[in-house]
Every structure is written in structure tokens, then in C-alpha cells.
Image: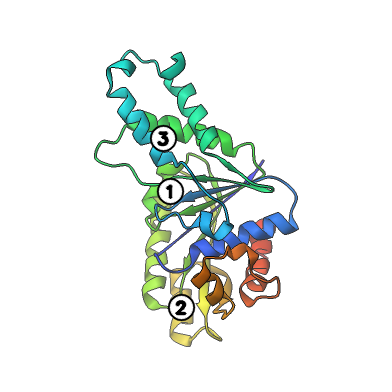
Amino acid sequence: MGKTIALAGKGGTGKTTVAAMIIRYLMEERSGSILAIDADPASNLPLVLGMEVEQTIGDIREDMLNLVQSSGALAGSMPGGMSKQDYLDYQVQMALVEGDRVDLLAMGRPEGPGCYCAANQMLRVIIDRLGGGYDYVVIDNEAGMEHLSRRTTRDVDVLLLVTDPTMRGLVAVEQMARMVPGLDIHVKEMYLIVNRLRGELPPPLAEAVERTGLELIGTVPEDPAMAEFEITGRPLVELPADSAVYRAMKEIARRVVDGAR
């Protein structure tokens, strides 16, 4: 049985960086296949992983909508005589970016006013079936928790809520945590990560962390080594192994995979 790890947090807190470091840890320290799903329309995960995406699930959905609105698709068949399910399955496989140890699927733009709900449901089933073939699935989710259950029907083994060391960030993750029981998926474990921390957690923020009721699985320090990578766009998975960010994330990732203890 594979392990599904999802990340969420207010925009700008560095959750994509956290996702990339977890994926790097899995690549370097664990055996098994990895599927990375970029479920944030900002689509930064390909950049930090050094992978290039040519087609997103949003593109596939929009193309499907255009096809079913055309006279050639109204009879229920798609190009080549394929069923809609087989056509979507084929398109998802083509959109999958294959790497040496990690494959990447980008969700792209969210559903618009012309949402083709039947296609969305079929895509969820296909993506979940695809994810079932991997030992690890890492989902970099957009900020709103309500979107997670629209992306997958899979149970989430670990949900990581990422915040920066600000009261606004902590309020945001607390609100996200409250939304979890109302999701259509089951979240088994949920933890908090404080990112970009300078020194120790200040007492007011430490008290705010306590009030969230979330278990703090670790903190990630602010790291000057990140500046060059942010400016040049160099993939963050190439951060030096002794960088403060990766050393902190390596221990957090270990706890996430093995079970926090």
C-alpha cells in the first residue's frame, strides 16, 4: 500500500519548497516509485523539481469540453473511436512527465464556469488509479482545503500544513485544519511545519502554535543558500546536502514517512 502525503498552506509560505525537499528525501533515502502531483494552479513544483510540463490536467479537461461541444463528439465517441474514459486515460498518460525516480503530473488551472463535471469525475478516477501504482504520492495542494477532495478520492496518510512564522499564517493553517473533517476524503495524520524561521520560535508564536492543537512536526530555518536558487530559478532539489533547509527537511521527511516520534 502506497503512502500519500499532501501539503497545504497560505500562499507564499514555502509549501512547494517543503514538497520538493520531501520528494528529494524520498529519491535519495528511500526505495520505491514516486508520483508528484502539482495541484496548485501557480504550478511552481515543476520548476523546483527541474522538470518541464507540456500539458496539464486543466488543459485536458478544457480540450474535452471543446470536443463534447462539437458535433463530432456528441454521439459519445472521441477521436479514433475511443470512449471518453479511454480518451482521458490516454491523455493523462501523455501528460505524465517521467523522471529517473519521480514522475510528475500537473493539475493546472481550476475548473471554470464551463466546468465539464463528468470529465472531472473521470479524471479523478484515472489519477487515483495512476497514483495506486506508486509507492509514494506527494500532492502540493493549493491554499484552499476544499479543493483537495476535488482533486482526489484517495485517503491522505499525512497532511502537512505549512506556515511561515507569522500570526496570519498560523491563523490560516488553523482554519484549514478545521475544514478537514468536512472533506470527502479521510486524513489519517495531520502535522504543522513552521518554515523560514529565524532562530527560536518567539513566545507569542509558540503560544499560537499550541492553540492550533496541531502537532508541530518540525521547523525549517531561513537559509541564505536559498537566495541564489530563487534568483536564478535553479531547481531547489539541487540545494547542497549540508544546507540548513535540507538538513531540517530531511529529519522532518523521515518522521513523516516513518511516523512522527
| Left or right of residue 71, residue 85 in this image | right
Task: Determine if residue 82 is in view.
Answer: no
Q: Which residue is mark 3?
A: 60
Amino acid type at circle 2 is Pro
**Observer-nearest residue: 215 or 156?**
156
Image coords of residue 242 (percent x, y)? 70, 75
To which quarter of the image does residue 143 belong? bottom left
Which residue does the image show at 49% across and 63% down from the upper left? 15
| Left or right of residue 228, residue 32 in this image | right
- Number of numbered labels in the structure image: 3
Give the CA separation, mark 3 to mark 2.
38 Å
Q: Quadrant of the N terminus?
A: top right
Image coords of residue 11 (percent x, y)? 39, 64
Of marks 3 and 2, the one in the foreground: 3
Task: Determine if residue 20 is in view.
Answer: yes
Mark carried by residue 107 = none
Q: Quadrant of the C terminus?
A: bottom right
Which residue does the image show at 54% across and 79% down from the upper left? 222
**Mark toward the start of the polypeptide (1 vs 2):** 1
Q: Which residue is mark 2?
A: 165
**Observer-nearest residue: 148 or 100?**
100
Q: Is residue 257 above or below residue 247?
A: above
As helix, strand or loop, the secondary structure at mark 3 comes to: helix
To which quarter of the image does residue 120 belong? top left
Amino acid type at circle 3 is Ile
As helix, strand or loop, the secondary structure at mark 2 comes to: loop
Of marks 3 and 1, the one in the foreground: 3
